[in-house]
Image: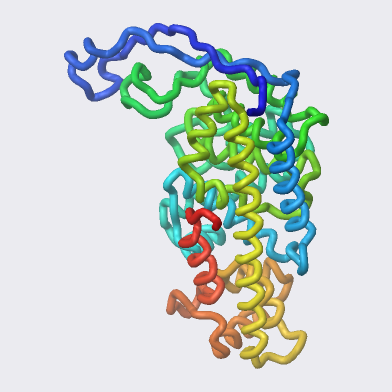
Amino acid sequence: MAGPWPALEATTVSWQPVEGLLEVSRRSLRSTPSSFEAAVVPRIAGVRLDLPGDVAADLDEATRLLAAFDAGGAGEIAPFASVLLRSESAASSQIENLTSSARALAEAEIGEGNRANAGVILGNVRTMQAALDLAGRLDEDAVLAMHRALMAQQSHHVPGRWRDQQVWVGGSARHPGDADYVPPVAAEVPGLMRDLVAFMDRDDLPPLAHAALAHAQFETIHPFTDGNGRTGRALLHSVLLHTGAIRRVTVPISAGLLAIRDDYFAALTAYRGGDIEPILRCVAEAARNGTHIGEQLVGTLREVRAGWSEVVTARAGSASWAILDLLLRQPVVTARVVIRELGVSAPTAQGGLRRLVEDGVLLESTGHRRNRVYRAPAVLRALDDYAAGLGRRAG
């Protein structure tokens, strides 16, 4: 067992229900508990980490696999960085039971379509991108910026601000008295987040352990009214990038966590009791599984691209060939998207798209004469098959 690690304590907090705030009867209000137990979360910035040899070896092996995947392994991974980021974001959302088809998500990314879940997941894509962009300065403002990117398109929660109210996990929606977990009171959040930032800035911890523990502490603090899980998993990637364990791509770690979701949630509970080994083991397994999942997805997309090369009739060097590479990272496009991304003229973009429709690479989705939307079914099918396979534990 890894340890020792400080366990949570608890404090009794008064709870005063507000009549009229929720549609409940006076009788229900009278039966509501007058107090609850909130977590007292220990600071961890200076806690010493002692790892048994087998746990350290497990983490080291998983870290080596992450680094090999990030470096490209047998092939070049970098061209697939954006699709890996989008896929990791979708898997992180799926842990929260938020799902969307690859087509709906790709349409949302270019401002087309109106599927609600796709918009929510797109927010998570932007959060993950912010996590990578801000990894060089992992401070409180960076964490707030990640949350702001996630929650920008909703109106029920304040984006990019520490919570100023009590939150809880599970139990009744009316009060925290029977909750599965009650995070610390709101007044403690700023100080706890400053401590977490100091912990993330340490340079004496194994990278994957560093990321796993930072993630678990973040989830324990629960600093926002909503979006904690998705922001916290983005933060895990920030720490890995900050430590140099990865440098170029988003490894599908959330895809690996999705396959062991029950173990993952149980590990977060164990962490609150001072037992850190389960979360370290979970993240190590998720990293191993995630690199395998990522390699499979990249391999499938390479096969799609090779298949296109066999059927495209455009002359070498024409816009159609450049559009093929764009489709691997953005499988739904318009002429405007092609113009912006490839820097070509409108007639060139439209001619390239028409040729790919004729060659069977693209389907035109709208039937309109103007503002046409084109999709690459082979890429979308590969991404949907990838999503359908998530949640299966590696053998």
- The residue sitting at 43% across, 8% down in the picture is 13
Q: Quadrant of residue 239?
A: top right
Q: Quick check: 272 left or right of 295?
A: left
Task: Give the quadrant of the N terminus.
Answer: top right
Q: What residue is rendered at 53% in x and 51% in y?
A: 91
Foreground: 197 or 340? 197
Q: Residue at x 23, y 14 (%)?
A: 29
140 and 185: which is toward the camera: 185
Rendered location of residue 276, percent (x, y): 61, 29
Q: Is residue 251 shown above or below 354?
A: above
Residue 43 is situated, as x and y percent measured from the top left of the image, at 66, 17
Q: Is residue 134 visible?
A: no
**Image side of residue 381 versus residue 341, left or right:** left
In the figure, is residue 9 to the left or right of 69?
left
Up the image or down, 100 lies above or below 132; here it is below
Instruction: Please tell me how many numbered marks the rendered image carries.
Output: 0
Residue 219's x, y, as percent? 55, 30
Is 156 situated above or below 74?
Answer: above
Q: Is residue 195 above or below residue 88?
A: above
Q: Is residue 15 at least partly visible in the picture?
A: yes
Residue under the image location 75 percent in, 38 percent down: 207
Image quarter of the C terminus: bottom right
Judging from the image, the colouring scheme is rainbow
Using the rendered view, name the quadrant where residue 319 is placed. bottom right
Q: Position of residue 126 (x, y in %)?
A: 60, 48
